[in-house]
Amino acid sequence: MSASCIWACFLFAISAAAAATQDKTPDVTVTCLVSEECLLPCSFPLATKESVRWFRQDVVVFSFRRGDNGSQTASQVFAGRAAMFPQLISGGNATLMLKEVGLMDRGTYRCYVRTSKGEHNAKVVLKVEGRFDANMLRCQNFEDHQELACFRVAPIQGLSLELYRLSGYEEMKCIVRNVFPPPRVTWATEPPTFEDLRPITRMLADKRGLYTADSRLRTLSGQPDLIYVCKVSTSYGGPTWTSSLREREIRGSEGRDLTIPCFAPPYLNNPTLHWSFTNGEDPAHILTYDSRSGDSVSTPPWDDHVELDGFRVPFGDGSLRLMDPDHAVHTGTYSCVFSVPYNTHTERTDVSIEGPTVNRSTSEAASYWWIVALAVAVLILGLVAMFAYLKLKGSAAKPPRRDPEEVTELNSVKDVGGESQMSEDGRFLAGGTNGQSGLS
Ligand SMILES: *[C@@H]1O[C@H](CO)[C@@H](O)[C@H](O)[C@H]1NC(C)=O
Ligand SMILES: *[C@@H]1O[C@H](CO)[C@@H](O)[C@H](O)[C@H]1NC(C)=O
């Protein structure tokens, strides 16, 4: 008795499950983009006298009835935005077309079809996503307020970061153009420093309502090898862009191989490396190296003069070896750019190749003596500083605080050129009274 019940129950369960699967199509997930057209699919076995109802959380949002020329009724939220195709319905296709979908249309829908042959149900899960295109519409759903805010976004297309040498100081300038909503600009250094970075950022909106962010940061004195990083982020969760820069100067001599250093900050993974050169004219391409593919492309005539260790690039070392350099040809600015999507790091190196002393005239000889003079000056400065320190230590006078300043002054004098030798000496002599006899 009980055994037969079990058997009967089992059979009943099997048939019930079979009946359920017969009419049940698996859930379909549809992903549509904000403000675009969207199709919620539903197909059913061919029959006559079709009537279709679309539900969302058990509320009818759209209905269709065959007969009096196929009447269609949309709920208020779908008014004017939803439609079905009578000619398709007779072919077993009850797809619902929804125009201008928004985030509020997200959810689970059910298509219910009744025909001469029976009933049919299908479930569709609708997902709606924003887009990251120019002038895209972006909506943010504030769940707690049940409020939806939509605005057109002009995404960040790129950053520019440049170093400007002004009188007495240097400034990094980071610019982002034509974006909406106004972005957030922050700065960092690599390696990080404990000093307070005090950028000044201005946001300017144009007639179209697009913003240009102009952020300036004074470089920290006494830290010449620092990388400055400008980061620009959005309030709507778009990608954060970064651009970083380091500038340096190096000297080489004609005919002697020279390595131009270039190192990526650690946060750039598998970057593409791009080297270029300029000596006042348009930049010339030297080489491009793709860390992912290992492809390297160099442009003649540079391919005979440069060498790159491709194995080191993925580890952030993109240093370029300049072989048999020539004073006239290879003196100039070398730029090395590491890039991954949304991030670039640039190292700009002013390279001067000294010509052979035999061929070169007085200017070259002068610059040679200038180097010697600089070396002597630095040596004497050091001695004077030490002497002054020892002397002043006892009498508790102010410490020789001017040392680092004078070093930077020497550096800036170096930029000016050969003529400045006198002023450099003058300044030096003015600074340390005891050094006068020693230098002359
Ligand atoms: C059905 O639609 C067609 C064309 O749209 C029209 O000519 C016809 O009069 C309509 N019939 C009824 C009953 O409304
Ligand atoms: C139903 O119609 C829509 C709209 O034309 C179409 O995209 C879809 O492929 C059709 N589905 C089937 C199963 O034919």
Image (spheres, helix red, strand yellow):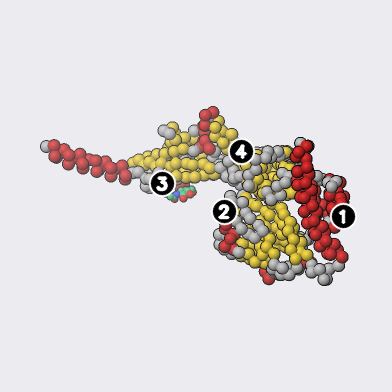
Camera sees residue 171: no
Residue type marked 4: Ser
Front: mark 1 or 2: 1
| Residue placed under numbered mark 2 in the picture | 269
Q: Which mark is residue 235?
A: 4
| Residue placed under numbered mark 3 in the picture | 43
Q: Considering the image in quadrants, where does the C terminus appear?
A: bottom right
What is the secondary structure assignment of the residue under circle 3? loop
Marks 4 & 3, CB-CB < 8 Å contact: no
- For disc 3, the neighbor class at 10 Å (few under 14, some 14 to 19, many from 20) is some
Q: How far apart are marks 3 and 1 (CA)?
A: 99 Å
Residue type marked 1: Ser
Q: Which of marks 2 and 3 is nearer the N terminus?
A: 3
Q: Which residue is drawn at 84% across and 49% down?
A: 435
Residue type marked 3: Ser
Q: Earlier in the sequence, mark 4 or mark 3?
A: 3
Marks 1 & 4, CB-CB < 8 Å contact: no
Marks 1 & 2, CB-CB < 8 Å contact: no
Tell me if the residue at label 4 has its CB under 8 Å from ligand 2: no
Q: Which mark is residue 440?
A: 1
- For disc 4, the neighbor class at 10 Å (few under 14, some 14 to 19, many from 20) is few
